[in-house]
Structure formats: C-alpha cells, structure tokens
C-alpha cells in the first residue's frame, strides 16, 4: 500500500480522547433485570482470560476512537470482520471497563465506567513490513468514529507485554456483585452533610462497604459516640 493511503497512524487524536470524561451507564436496583446490570454465567467465556495473551503472528495495538463511542466502534468492527471473513487478520477487540456499586437511600446503583476513554485495543496481524493489510485498513478506516492507531509513518506501534497484560486484566468481565466504592478510611476527619448530626465533625472509625455505611465517632454532649451513616452523608473535612 502506498504511503498516501496509509494515513491511519499519527500522533493526533480523533477527539479529546483520554482527556474527555468516561462514558458511564447506570442502573438502579429496580432495573436489575436490564442488560446494564444483567449477571453473567460464572462459566461464561471471557476472551480476556480464556485465551492466551498473545496468539501466533498477532500483536496488540491502540486505536483512537471518538470518546463515548468505544462500544459502538467495537461492535461495528467485530461485525464487519466477521462479514468479511477477516478473523485470521483481526482478533479480539477490547474496551476495558470497571463496574462499581453505590448505595443511596437504600437503593443500589451499578456504574460501568470506561477505563481508557477514547481508545480501544485491537489484536491484529500486520504485513511483514509492519503495515496494516489493505483490506483491514479500509475496513477500519471506513468505520464511523474511528481515528488513528498509535504509531508513526503508517505503521502502528505494538503494545509492550506489560501494557497488554494490564489491559487484558482490566478487560476481565466485571464481577457479578461489584463492591461499593468507598472514599474513606479509618482515621479520616469528616464533616456530616445530612441528617440529625448535620455540620458535626467526626473521625471515621470503621468502613462497612458491604452495607454502604461508615461508622463515625462524633462528640455529643462532651462524649464520643459512634454513628453509622451512609457514605454519601459525609465528606472529608477541609484541612
């Protein structure tokens, strides 16, 4: 392929990429049956862990895409690869995400956040000279939302083994019951924002993530008393 056609690799992102906020999808406990929080079978196939890190003749590459379009680009590319019969040239396409659970007012919310907004990861076989095969090049380039591969001079740069290992670890299927993300630790000074002890200051005594609660020691009438609060009812005290 000529240098003129090979324009997919440069150092300019298609959008703000990793600088843009990660796309999040949320669902309350009442929506637990929806696809956003649907549980996966414990024995379900997971391409991040049930396949080798590297497959013979293939490397991993970073593809810039429009932020908040990562899933759409991945799904479109997977369908196009299958339709064109290019599975031997293009393998897995990964969008690492993290699931976290929050509790507020007794309601559960599952949040799925992109760990690398503006990027997807493509397993691909290049030509011997390090270029993208022409049929693969046009298949990817003509997909809406696609930018450039990370690399220079028309040749994408393979990810290092350490980068691949971390990316695949981050790409594992999220836990069926993700833990509550807690921003507090024992000993933290906090201010109570809501409830009967609003504006009181205290010290975190214990964090109870499985219940979404924080036990805070508050001085009431000259004596310290433990008070259990939902994590959103407190904030770290200003230093």
Image (cartoon, helix red, strand yellow):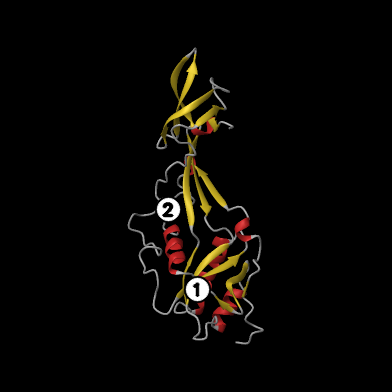
| Residue on which the image places disc 2 | 174
Left or right side of 53 for 124: right
Q: Position of residue 78 (x, y in %)?
A: 50, 70
Residue that sits furthest to the front in the current view: 239
Q: Position of residue 24 (x, y in %)?
A: 56, 50
| Crowd around label 1: few <14 · some 14–19 · many ≥20 (10 Å) | many
Q: Is residue 103 above or below residue 115?
A: above
Quadrant location, the C terminus: top right
Q: Is residue 215 above or below residue 157?
A: above
Is disc 2 placed on a helix, strand or loop? loop
Q: CA distance from mark 2 to mark 1?
A: 26 Å
Q: Nearer the viewer, residue 28 or 236?
A: 236
Asked whether the viewer can see residue 35, the reply is: no
| Residue on which the image places disc 1 | 158
Quadrant in the rendering for residue 139: bottom right
Q: Position of residue 46 (x, y in %)?
A: 38, 62
Q: Nearer the viewer, mark 2 or mark 1?
A: 1
């Amino acid at each position: 392929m000529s240098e003129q056609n090979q324009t997919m690799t440069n150092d300019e992102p298609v959008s703000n990429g990793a600088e843009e906020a990660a796309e999040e999808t949320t669902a309350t406990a009442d929506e637990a049956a929806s696809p956003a929080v649907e549980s996966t079978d414990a024995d379900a196939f997971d391409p991040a862990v049930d396949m080798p890190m590297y497959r013979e003749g293939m490397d991993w590459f970073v593809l810039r895409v429009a932020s908040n379009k990562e899933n759409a680009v991945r799904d479109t590319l997977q369908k196009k690869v299958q339709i064109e019969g290019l599975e031997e040239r293009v393998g897995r396409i990964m969008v690492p995400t993290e699931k976290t659970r929050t509790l507020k007012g007794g309601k559960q919310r599952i949040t799925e956040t992109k760990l690398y907004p503006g990027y997807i990861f493509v397993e691909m076989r290049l030509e011997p000279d390090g270029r993208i095969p022409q049929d693969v090049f046009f298949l990817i380039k003509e997909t809406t939302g696609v930018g450039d591969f990370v690399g220079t001079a028309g040749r994408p740069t393979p990810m290092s083994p350490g980068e691949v290992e971390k990316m695949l670890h981050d790409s594992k299927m999220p836990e069926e019951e993700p833990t509550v993300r807690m921003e507090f630790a024992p000993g933290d000074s906090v201010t109570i924002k809501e409830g009967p002890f609003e504006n009181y200051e205290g010290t975190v005594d214990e964090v109870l993530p499985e219940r979404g609660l924080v036990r805070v020691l508050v001085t009431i009438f000259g004596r310290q008393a433990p008070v259990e609060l939902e994590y959103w009812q407190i904030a770290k005290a200003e230093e």
